[in-house]
Image: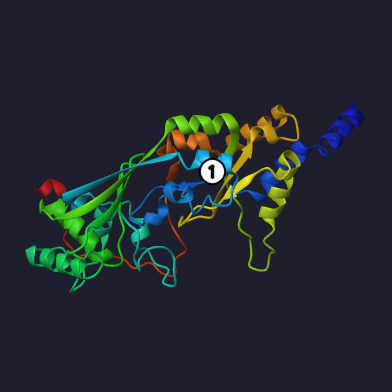
Amino acid sequence: MRYLTELICQLYRLTDHHKLTAATFKNLADIKLVEPTADADTILQLENIFSEYSLRYIDRDLAEILSNIITTDKKHSLDFDFNKLQSLTASKSFGCGWNKVINGSWFKNLYSWGEGMYPAKNLKAENISDWEDNIWHIEHEGFNPRDSINVTYYSWLDRYVASNSGGSHHAAMVVYQSVRDKLEYKREAVIEQLSINSNTVEILDQNYYSFIFQIKRPSNKTEIYTSEYEFIDALKEFVENRYTILNPVNYVSSIKLVFIPKHALKTNDKTFRNWFYSAISCGKIISFPDYLKNPAHYHTHHYSHELNSITLGDPSRKYKLREDF
């Protein structure tokens, strides 16, 4: 009996299912998607992943489906309330960069960032003079009053994101003080409201296996970075070369999206589905159709990056709380 068991195990190790399973656990990280923060790069920007430019070289049938996943409704507002903004596209204080400290990318929205920002002589929100000073700064840096603000509203995250070229710190202070002190600052804005087309998601699910994965990083700098190739080589045993990989644009982690035509499987469909659902249950991949049906469910990981130092706030600082007003 023991000999028979060992023989079965040896034969299983020769199967494509075992090779892909082994490659999955060896090379894939536990997949984690971050909660959106004040930094727009913590948002998985599907409209950019599925733009005409990003899809220009992929299979036309797949491109046709992906190009219709996101629907857009553009509106023009003359009195957009600035304090609705939750994220910005640009800041010197986003991401890890050269100065590895806690910064705007760590805060869940602009209000929280403004509330937590260390007050400086030219950057604080203590009185009406500071309010006017912060507005002057944003209008002379990243939000020229002669131009409309370009805003993207991600309906599946209920989140407003502004495209900016500067002025992020003062913008966070304006949002914070606007909410805290019930002050109004309204601007002309072009709002692009994005939604996910559930009918197209169903078409994708019917015709493709698709999932999100992330490769493990090398444990040290001298290690050769081969994990992605090992995993893809194992995947090829199932699907030949009939697969597509897309890399998200401007996202904080190096996740990838894979699309495999269901009719292109070389092996038994049941065998591949066994691996697929096992990898999902083990947290190694996320089914992309499931993600599209409820994105907020998957964005639960708190953003952080390596720190060189931690600077504590001024203990004498007095905070005004919302309930005080």
Q: According to the image, label 1 marks what residue?
A: 63
**Rendering quarter of residue 319:** bottom left
Q: Name the residue located 54 percent from the left edge and 34 percent from the top edge.
A: 204
Q: How is the image coloured?
A: rainbow
Q: How many marks?
A: 1
Q: Where is residue 8 shown, x and y percent of the image?
A: 86, 31
Q: Is residue 269 left or right of residue 193?
A: right
Amino acid type of the residue tagged 1 in the rendering: Ala
**Residue 291 against residue 172 in the figure, above or below:** above
Q: Where is residue 278 shown, x and y percent of the image?
A: 64, 33
Q: Name the residue located 56 percent from the left edge and 40 percent from the top edge.
A: 62
Q: Secondary structure at mark 1?
A: helix
Residue found at the far top of this picture: 1
**Residue 93 against residue 304 in the figure, above or below:** below
Q: Residues within 10 Å of mark 1 (few under 14, many from 20)?
A: some
Q: Name the residue located 45 percent from the left edge and 39 percent from the top edge.
A: 68
Q: Where is residue 109 shown, x and y percent of the image?
A: 30, 52
Residue 47 visible at all: yes
In-front residue for pair 322/226: 226
Q: Where is residue 112 shown, x and y percent of the image?
A: 27, 54
In-front residue for pair 62/288: 62
Q: Is residue 89 left or right of residue 204?
A: left
In-front residue for pair 270/178: 270
Q: Name the residue located 12 percent from the left edge and 66 percent from the top edge.
A: 130
Residue found at the far right of this picture: 3
Where's the N terminus, which quadrant?
A: top right
